[in-house]
Image (cartoon, helix red, strand yellow):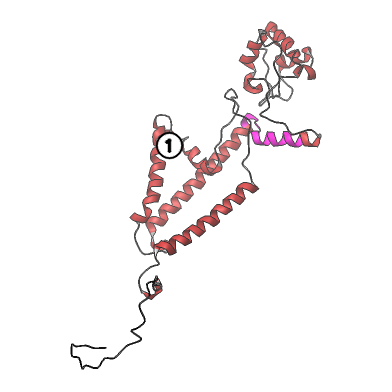
Amino acid sequence: MAHGHKSNEKVVFVGDSRVKKAGMFQTPPDYTAFPGKSEAFIPNFLLKEWMVGCVVLVGFLVWVIAEPAPLGYPADPTNASFIPMPDWYFLFLYQFLKYPYVSQDYVLLGTMGIPGIMFGALMLAPFLDTGKERRFYRRPIASSLMLLTLASCVYLTVVSWDHYQHMLAENNTIPEHHERADKAREAIERGEPRPNPLKKAAAIIEADDPAMSIAQAQCIGCHAADFSGAVGPALIGVGNRMTQEEIAAIITNGSENGAMPHFNDKLSAEEIDQLAVWLAKQTQ
C-alpha cells in the first residue's frame, strides 16, 4: 500500500481491497484470549446461573409432586388442643421467636429486624466481599459466618421439632394429617368413601335446649364447636352408640383409658343428667 502522496509510488495491496467489509455481527474473541480477565457476566455467566436455577426448580417440583404437603382439618379457633406448626423450612424461625428477647414486647425485632438484617447481609455479600480468593479456608470471615448460620438453622430446627414431638406426647395428641390419613385408610378398608372434612356436620337436635349451653361451655374444646369431633369423638350421633345411662356414667367418671376427664367436680348431678338426656337424643 502507498505511504506517501507521490503518484509514481509503488502500491502494494494486502489482501483483496475490492472485498467490502461485512456489516454483520463480528464474533468477539473468547475471554480466555485475555489473560487475567474473567468470563463475561452477560450472557455467559447469567445463562449458566439460569440453567442451574431451572434444574433446582424442576427438582423442587418433582419433590412437591412426590411428597404432597400434609393437609389438616379446616381451621377451628375453638380447638384448644391444636398445636400450630409451620412448614419445615420455617421451623428455625418459629423456634427463634420463642426466645424472650425476640418475642412479646420485642416481637417486631424478631419478625422483621433480625431476619431483615440476615437477608440484607446475604444480598450485600457480593458487594462487601470483593476479594478474588475463592477457596473457603482463605476467606475466614465469610466462611465462619456461613458455617455459623447453617449451624444455627440446623440447631433451631432440631430443637423446634423435638419440642413439637414432646408436646404431642404430653397432650396425647395425634397430628391432624396422621388422623386424617388413618380415617381415610380405615374407610377404604371398610369399602366406604373417603371422609370429607369439609362436609358440614349433621344438624344438632334441639339446639335450643338449656343443656346446649352446658355442652358449649364444657365440651367444645375436645369435641369441636359443631360437636363433629376434634380430639375427642363426635357427639353428633352419640345417642346411636351409647344409652343415656352410659353417657351419664362417662360424664361423671370419665373414660377408662383416661382420654376423657371426669366432670363430677365441675358439674352438678342435675346438670350431668340434663346433659346426658340431651346427648342421648343426638341420634343422627
- Residue 129 image position (x, y, % from top left): 35, 57
Labels in figure, total:
1
Tell me the quadrant of the picture where the N terminus can be found: bottom left
Closer to the camera, 111 or 156? 111
Residue at left 36%, top 81%? 19
Residue at left 76%, top 13%? 280
Closer to the camera, 6 or 44? 6
Q: Amino acid at mark 1?
A: Thr
Residue 112 colored in magenta in the image: no
- Residue 12 image position (x, y, % from top left): 29, 91
Q: Quadrant of residue 103?
A: top left
Relative to 245, does residue 75 appear above or below in the rendering? below
Residue stretch in magenta: 170-186
In the rendered image, which residue does mark 1 sit on?
111
Relative to 151, does residue 258 appear above or below in the rendering? above
Tell me the quadrant of the picture where the C terminus can be found: top right
Residue 175 colored in magenta in the image: yes
Residue 265 left/right relative to 54: right
Magenta-drawn stretch, dominant element (helix, strand or loop): helix
Q: Would you say residue 265 is visible in this rendering?
A: no
Determine crowd level at label 1: few under 14, some 14-19, many 20+ residues with C-alpha closer than 10 A: some
- Residue 2 image position (x, y, % from top left): 24, 88
Residue 106 left/right relative to 153: left
Relative to 154, does residue 31 appear above or below in the rendering? below
Closer to the camera, 18 or 174? 18
Label 1 sits on a secondary structure element that is helix
- Residue 234 image position (x, y, % from top left): 71, 22
Closer to the camera, 104 or 44? 44
